[in-house]
Amino acid sequence: LRPVVESLMRQDPTERPDFEELRGWLRSLTRSAPEPDVGRRTLLGPPSLDSGASSDPRRLPIVRRRGW
C-alpha cells in the first residue's frame, strides 16, 4: 500500500496515477491480501445477503451502490 500512497503524494500532478491505474492497483492489492486470522476480535457476518444465493467464504461481498 505504501507505493500507492507515495505515488498519490507526488508534488507534480502529472506524475500521479490516474483513476483507472489507481483502481487497478487497489483491486490487485485487495485480491492478493491474505485472509485475516479468526481471533477474538474478528466479527463473522452472515453467509449471504441474498437468501437464495450460494456464498463463497473466500470472496469479499460486492457492494453495489445506486448511480455507479
Image (cartoon, rainbow, N blue to C red):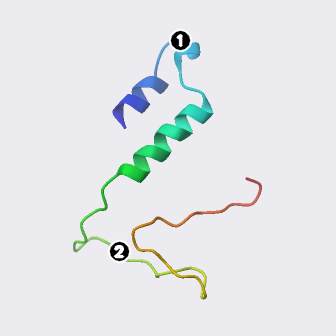
Work out whether 64 lies above or below 19.
Answer: below
Whole-percent x, y for residue 22 in the image: 53, 34
Work out whether 1 lies above or below 58.
Answer: above
In whole angstroms, how far apart are the C-alphas of marks 2 and 1?
42 Å
Picture residue at 30% right of the left edge, 56% below the top = 34
Picture residue at 42% right of the left edge, 31% below the top = 5
The quarter of the picture where residue 49 lies is bottom right
Picture residue at 49% right of the left edge, 78% below the top = 55
Q: Quick one: label 1, few (<14), some, or many (20+) residues within 10 Å?
A: few
Q: Judge by depth and name the residue closer to the eye, 40 or 26.
A: 26
Whole-percent x, y for residue 52 in the image: 61, 87
Q: Judge by depth and name the residue closer to the eye, 27 or 3.
A: 27
> In the image, 13: left or right of 40?
right
> In the image, 12: left or right of 56?
right
Residue at label 1? 12
Q: For the residue marked with disc 2, what is the amino acid?
A: Leu
Work out whether 22 lies above or below 35.
Answer: above
Outermost residue to the top? 12
Whole-percent x, y for residue 3 in the image: 37, 29
> In the image, 35: left or right of 21?
left
Q: For the residue marked with disc 1, what is the amino acid?
A: Asp
Q: Quick one: label 2, few (<14), some, or many (20+) residues within 10 Å?
A: few
